[in-house]
Amino acid sequence: MDAPPTAPGTPPDERRPAAFFDLDKTIIATSSATAFSRSFLANGLLTRRSVLRTGYAQLLYLLGGADAEQTERLRAELSRSVIGWDTALVSRIVRETLHEAIDPTVYAEAVALIEEHHAAGRDVVIVSASGSEIVEPIGELLGADRVVATRMQVVDGRYTGEIDFYAYGEQKAAAIRRLADEQGYDLRASFAYSDSVTDAPMLATVGHGFVVNPDRTLRRLAAAEGWGVLTFVRPVPLFSARDRRRAAGVAVAVLVTLVVLLVLRRRRRS
């Protein structure tokens, strides 16, 4: 997924912008960390009791404005749930059930934005507090160029429940700055998108910050900081959205070709 890095210390006039996206409730309409609960349960990684606990934590997260308290509650519950899990099994389950778990929850508006940034020559980077084993396959599905995600501690191929790097709050912003140095991104010309007030440091790191479906607190902060406000309302199957765009593009190309042929035919007759 990663391209060869630009040497650190890239001159300012050679730097390029990028687009940084939060994942949960920004690109997808749910929590990526709990989207695979059914599959984890079916494979014996979760019990019904732990599913209920994480489901309750996710409900509070989805209804509570994704503030620091709700996000921390979800993080703590998920960390406790994965102790002893085999990392290879987790990766296999995620990749095998990726489309079933994630595909229907992707916002069409986010897909369009990702495509627009790529068309403009900007790298797209997903920055998520969810674990890398989950976020990286989702990033590949979405066509992201890079991923910044939480890294769980692993000993002998199993999660300990501890966290080596938590991609959250100011740590997201710090990770973006490091990546910008490595890849030669111009952060003043870059874009960032998030639904959560906890991502204020990330939004403040770039020149063009946007809040997605903000609650009242985040909307007030956006107004004070001069960030844009976006509304995403259409979770649609990812490939259906892309297929529709591809079909529309083909239709336009065919129409243009027919018009050109018609004009040429008339010119020959005249």
Image: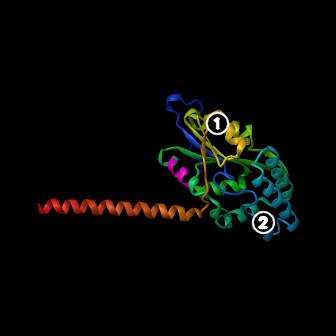
Residue 37: percent from left, percent from top? 77, 64
Residue 10: percent from left, percent from top? 55, 31
Mark 2 is on which residue type?
A: Phe
Q: In the rendered structure, which segment of residues is drawn in magenta?
A: 111-116
Specify whether residue 239 is in view: yes
Main SS class of the magenta portion in the image: helix
Residue sitting at 74 percent across and 37 percent down?
A: 170
Task: Label 2: state its secondary structure.
Answer: helix
Residue 122: percent from left, percent from top? 52, 43
Q: Which residue is mark 2?
A: 40
Asked where in the image residue 168 lies, by quadrant, the reply is top right
Report the side of 14 relative to 254 (left or right).
right
Residue sitting at 71 percent across and 52 percent down?
A: 132
Report the side of 179 relative to 114 (left or right).
right
Mark 1 is on which residue type?
A: Ala
Instruction: Identify which residue, 217 or 67, lies in the foreground.
Output: 217
Is residue 123 rendered magenta in the image? no
User: Is label 1 or label 2 in front?
Assistant: 1
Residue 26: percent from left, percent from top? 65, 51
Q: Quadrant of the C terminus?
A: bottom left
Instruction: Identify which residue, 189 or 64, lies in the foreground.
Output: 64
Report the side of 229 relative to 197 (left or right).
left
Q: Earlier in the sequence, mark 1 or mark 2?
A: 2
Asked where in the image residue 175 lies, by quadrant, the reply is top right
Is residue 113 rendered magenta in the image? yes
| Residue 223: assigned label | 1
Count how many numbered circles sit on residues in the image: 2
